[in-house]
Image (spheres, helix red, strand yellow):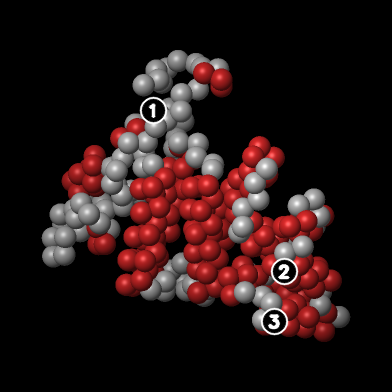
Amino acid sequence: MADPSATYHLKDAIRLVPECRDMCPEFERHEREFQKALHFLEKIPGTDQVDHQKAVKRYRRSAAGDPPPLPSDIRPPPVLNQTLDYLIHTIIGQYGINNTDVHVFVFDRTRSVRNDLVLQNERGPAAIAIHERIARYHAICCYQLFGQAQVSLQQEIEQLRKALQSLIEFYAEARTQRGEIYPNEPEFQAYQLLAYMHKSDLPSHAHYLPDRVFAHPYMQQALRIQAAYRAGFSARFFSLIQSPETPFVMACVAHMSFATVRSNAIKSLQS
């Protein structure tokens, strides 16, 4: 293990090899049971005891001076994928996406999944597949949970944008370093465009994407939606959203701009 007090050159950096084979490291399970910090989804029903099969590692923000993470506390990509399967198929499958207590749990645990990928510097196919699923989840939440007082829409948008930004970086590395274009890149480049509709430089950035990505129907539809948004054509904007060419998740991402479009339309009528 590296000496946390030592200074290393980047070329000598030691790649962390994750060793945790459970959804939650053993030490954390016992620690949170002792601290009475378990979510109800992690307890044996009717008790305050941890259910070792259901506990999921929570997100913990790194702070200056913290020691480096232990390999035994970091989950490898197959375990992270299994954890995501559990969160989406088992937890959301049973409780739905609109249960606020469950949403808080899934929001935190998906953030922890992404953080484990960062800690082990995983940026390849596994990281891409996991981030794609998490980004879709946040996009749907931005729409489904809109207006719920207990949910911070701004935090949801923030995590969606972070997941998308990571994906954009992963896709760029895959193209430049390995000559690969991932099949879902057009979908998420389109979401990135719509998540930052207020940014004037994104449409020009899109023109530098490979033809296979730029010419994809998802990208072209996203560009049409953004053009209507920027031109202030509210009727065309909502017509495009309702079009069969706009998939559901794409409409969910665009939904975060609905209030701005409506507000601008009202102002133009009053002027």
- Whether residues under marks 2 and 1 lie with C-beta atoms below 8 angstroms apart, the answer is no
- 3D distance between C-alphas at marks 1 and 3: 52 Å
Quarter of the view holding residue 103 = bottom left
Query: Could you say whether the residue bearing mark 2 is in a helix, strand or loop?
Result: helix
Mark 2 or mark 1: whose residue is earlier in sequence? 1
Mark 1 or mark 3: whose residue is earlier in sequence? 1
Q: Can residue 213 be seen in this view?
A: yes
Query: Could you say whether the residue bearing mark 1 is in a helix, strand or loop?
Result: loop
- 3D distance between C-alphas at marks 2 and 3: 13 Å
Q: Name the residue under label 1.
A: 67
Quadrant of the drawing holding the N terminus: top left
Quarter of the view holding residue 19 = top left
Percent x, y for residue 116? 43, 42
- Which marked residue is nearer to the observer: mark 1 or mark 3? 3
Q: Mark 3 points at which residue?
A: 243
Mark 2 or mark 3: whose residue is earlier in sequence? 2
Q: Is residue 112 visible?
A: no
Q: Mark 2 points at which residue?
A: 217
